Amino acid sequence: MVFPRAAIRHDSGRKFYQSARKKKNGSAINNNNNNNNVPLLIGSSIFVSIVLSLPLFVVIILMGAPVYKYSLKTLYLSLHLSQLIFNPLIILSNLNVNKIKRLFKQDHLYRIIFHHGILSSVLLTLGGCWLGVIPIPLDWDRPWQQWPITLLVGGYLGGVVGSLTLVEFIGKKIELT
């Protein structure tokens, strides 16, 4: 699992979030408050992630998940994926939706994503989950090919690989204008 507080301080995402500084009377005021309530941030991000698991459940059903027989397992899958996808994004943005909107309006979005550990783990979690459906139609008689085990394994492996992309770029700085 990615530890979001450690990744917020990494240099690769610093310039993007420092671009949120505001100029007042000619001096820059930093938006990083030292009096953040970290337990409240983590608790609210977990709550919002659980709430966002319901729309994710609907999206998974619309993409072809079994509806009747495996709906509870699909709900568990959406709960897992929402904690892997939404929770780090919410903590990274500090519950500020405008930061996430500004991120997706950047010019070199993929360059920014793959130079940031949390963002790349979120993207590769989605990709790993999508690739995790490949072994399902091969055989259902093996326990590891049951619904949704391969999707969960693919999602977790994608998250780990996305976090490891950060290791390659340690020490390199990217311009996030």
Image: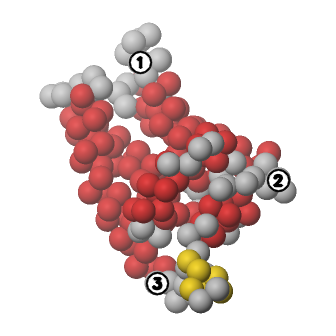
Q: Earlier in the sequence, mark 3 or mark 2?
A: 3
Q: Nearer the viewer, residue 69 or 105?
A: 105
C-alpha separation, residue under disc 3 versus residue under disc 2: 31 Å
Q: Amino acid at mark 1?
A: Ile
Q: Are marks 2 and 1 in contact (CB under 8 Å)?
A: no
Residue at which label 3 appears: 37
Q: Are marks 3 and 2 in contact (CB under 8 Å)?
A: no
Q: Secondary structure at mark 1?
A: loop
Q: How is the image coloured?
A: secondary structure
Q: Amino acid at mark 3?
A: Asn
**x, y percent for residue 108:** 63, 42
Q: Nearer the viewer, residue 66 or 14?
A: 14
Indicate which label's residue lies in the foreground, 3 or 1. 3
Indicate which label's residue lies in the foreground, 2 or 1. 2
C-alpha separation, residue under disc 2 versus residue under disc 1: 40 Å
The residue carrying pointer 3 sits among few (fewer than 14), some (14 to 19) or many (20 or more) residues within 10 Å by Cα, namely few
Is residue 30 toward the left or the right of residue 41 in the image?
right
Q: Secondary structure at mark 2?
A: loop
The residue most toward the top is 138
C-alpha separation, residue under disc 3 versus residue under disc 1: 43 Å
Is residue 131 something that shows in the picture? Answer: yes
Is residue 16 toward the left or the right of residue 94 in the image?
right
**x, y percent for residue 141:** 38, 15
Residue at which label 1 appears: 136
Above or below, 59 relative to 169: above
Residue at which label 2 appears: 172
Q: Amino acid at mark 2?
A: Lys
Is residue 10 toward the left or the right of residue 61 in the image?
right
Q: Earlier in the sequence, mark 3 or mark 1?
A: 3
Q: Earlier in the sequence, mark 2 or mark 1?
A: 1
- The quarter of the image holding the N terminus is bottom right
